[in-house]
Amino acid sequence: MRGRRKFSLFLTIFVGIFLVYLILLFLFPFGTLAQTTILFHGDVANSVFLVSCSLFVALVLTGMFDLIVRILRRPWHKRKFGKILVSEGYITEGELKVALSEQSLRLGDVLYRAGRINGEKLDSALRYQKKNPEKLGIILKKMGYSSEEDIEWALKRMRRSLGEILQEKGLLNEIEMHRALALQHHGLRRM
């Protein structure tokens, strides 16, 4: 909320609280609310106390209202990073699909595509895995088809973010990635 609007809201709430207090004081002159006007021995002290309390309550209510407005203005879900990249024109829908498909590759596929294992060895390890429910990386090491370094390399490739994949492919630069991440984080849309 802008400063001027916030101040206007604060002033409206303050005046409203004070008016409600005066109306209640007028309607119930001998109630407990009337007792708050005689807390101190002087009229000035009592007035300062009442104005201070009204200011404090108005400040708290303004802050709460501002927070509620901010929450309600935020999108209910974050836009997906890939969709932001496409809508901003950084990549095409096809390039997004290719990068996303690369993110969903399994360990054997990553090793095979990189030429770090051949198809026969991978098929053999997958057949063994059906009979022995172990992780494929462990099986490949046991069978001597892949080294620890190859498995670690493939696992690291599998953990890459969409932005990292697109940067490796030369489809996205660092500035574009940070702009899209800022749009996602703040829930903004370019006008």
Image (cartoon, rainbow, N blue to C red):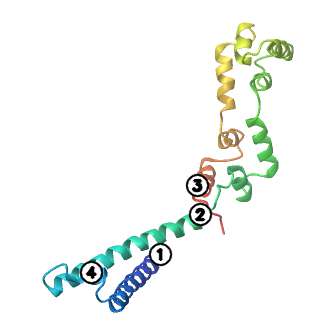
Residue at far top of view: 143
**Mark toward the start of the polypeptide (1 vs 4):** 1
Which quadrant holds residue 129? top right
**Is residue 89 shown above or below 104?**
below
Mark 2 Cα shell of 10 Å, populated few (<14), some (14-19), many (≥20): few
SS for dot 3: helix
Residue indicated by mark 2: 74
Real-space Cα separation, disc 1 to disc 3, in angstroms: 21 Å
Instruction: Tell us which disc is closer to us: 2 or 3.
Output: 2
Does the CB distance between marks 2 and 4 fall below 8 Å? no
**Is residue 177 shown above or below 158?**
below
Q: Is residue 63 left or right of residue 103?
A: left
**Is residue 175 shown above or below 143?**
below
Residue indicated by mark 1: 2
**Is residue 72 shown above or below 160?**
below
Mark 3 Cα shell of 10 Å, populated few (<14), some (14-19), many (≥20): few
Real-space Cα separation, disc 1 to disc 4, in angstroms: 28 Å
Mark 1 Cα shell of 10 Å, populated few (<14), some (14-19), many (≥20): few
Image location (x, y in percent) of residue 156: 64, 28
Instruction: Tell us which disc is closer to us: 3 or 4.
Output: 4
Which quadrant holds residue 61? bottom left
Question: Hey, what amino acid is under mark 3?
Answer: His
Real-space Cα separation, disc 2 to disc 3, in angstroms: 11 Å
Question: Hey, what amino acid is under mark 4?
Answer: Leu
